[in-house]
Image (cartoon, coloured by chain):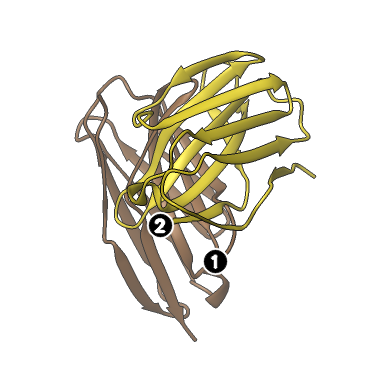
Amino acid sequence: DVKVTQSSRYLVKRTGEKVFLECVQDMDHENMFWYRQDPGLGLRLIYFSYDVKMKEKGDIPEGYSVSREKKERFSLILESASTNQTSMYLCASSTPVLVGLGEKLFFGSGTQLSVL
Amino acid sequence: GENVEQHPSTLSVQEGDSAVIKCTYSDSASNYFPWYKQELGKGPQLIIDIRSNVGEKKDQRIAVTLNKTAKHFSLHITETQPEDSAVYFCAASKAFNKFYFGSGTKLNVKP
């Protein structure tokens, strides 16, 4: 069965701390994503990676960075956490539904981050 | 960029009734429209999708319709059951790795 694992379910951090959110997939997928989920705003893309060491900014990259040193692992980094980064963070990997016709996303269970 | 609007934000139905969730999109180049279901404490999971060259797709009690001219698509769930209670997200995509999600609909099916 397909599995995307996020290292923490709940995380509480202080303002100004450096925060690492880890994600591992076991499906050998090329693409991995970090989304942020906020009530009433849906899912918004922070960063995605289409290969090891390759990354592209999503729609809301400010205040975040990412690292992909190995194919199966994609990390989201909050360089200096702020209260407005309190949110649910979802990692995903993807595989083509059909070539050129869309990707199927597989999500982890999410990390609820609270920045105090 | 693409803008996806989803309605309603909450929907409460009686078990056995039908539920309909509607989404509109702005970019006529979008060509792939998936629907995801998120149960409490879990990540979203793909339940059905449709491509722009198809008008309707069914999978048991779930169906999705697409009107390209009006730029809207809908999720239809028939004979709802309590296990259908969840948050549903629509999305639109034109590039393989770019998805734009709606704001979500919380469906509550009352036994």
Q: Could you tell me residue B19's position as x and y percent?
A: 38, 66
Q: Could one spot residue A102 in this view of the protein?
A: no
Image colour for chain A is yellow
Read off the residue under disc 1: B40
Q: Which mark, by number, is residue B76? A: 2
Direction from residue A84 to residue B111 in the image, left or right = right
Q: What residue is rendered at 27% in x and 28% in y?
A: B2
Q: What residue is rendered at 38% in x and 24% in y?
A: B31
Quarter of the image with the C terminus of chain A is bottom left
Is A66 above or below relative to B88?
above
Q: Nearer the viewer, mark 1 or mark 2?
A: 1
Q: Say what amino acid the circle numbered 1 marks.
A: Leu
Is B27 above or below relative to A91?
above
Q: Say what amino acid the circle numbered 2 marks.
A: His
Q: Could you tell me residue A83's position as x and y percent?
A: 35, 51
Decide: marks 1, 2 in contact (CB < 8 A)? no
Q: Could one spot residue B31 in this view of the protein?
A: yes
**Closer to the camera, B28 or A2?**
A2
Q: What residue is rendered at 70% in x and 30% in y?
A: A73
Quarter of the image with the N terminus of chain A is top right
Q: Residues within 10 Å of mark 1 (few under 14, many from 20)?
A: few
Direction from residue B11 to residue A108 in the image, left or right = right
Q: CA distance from mark 1 to mark 2?
A: 21 Å
Direction from residue A63 to residue A107 in the image, left or right = right
Image colour for chain B is brown
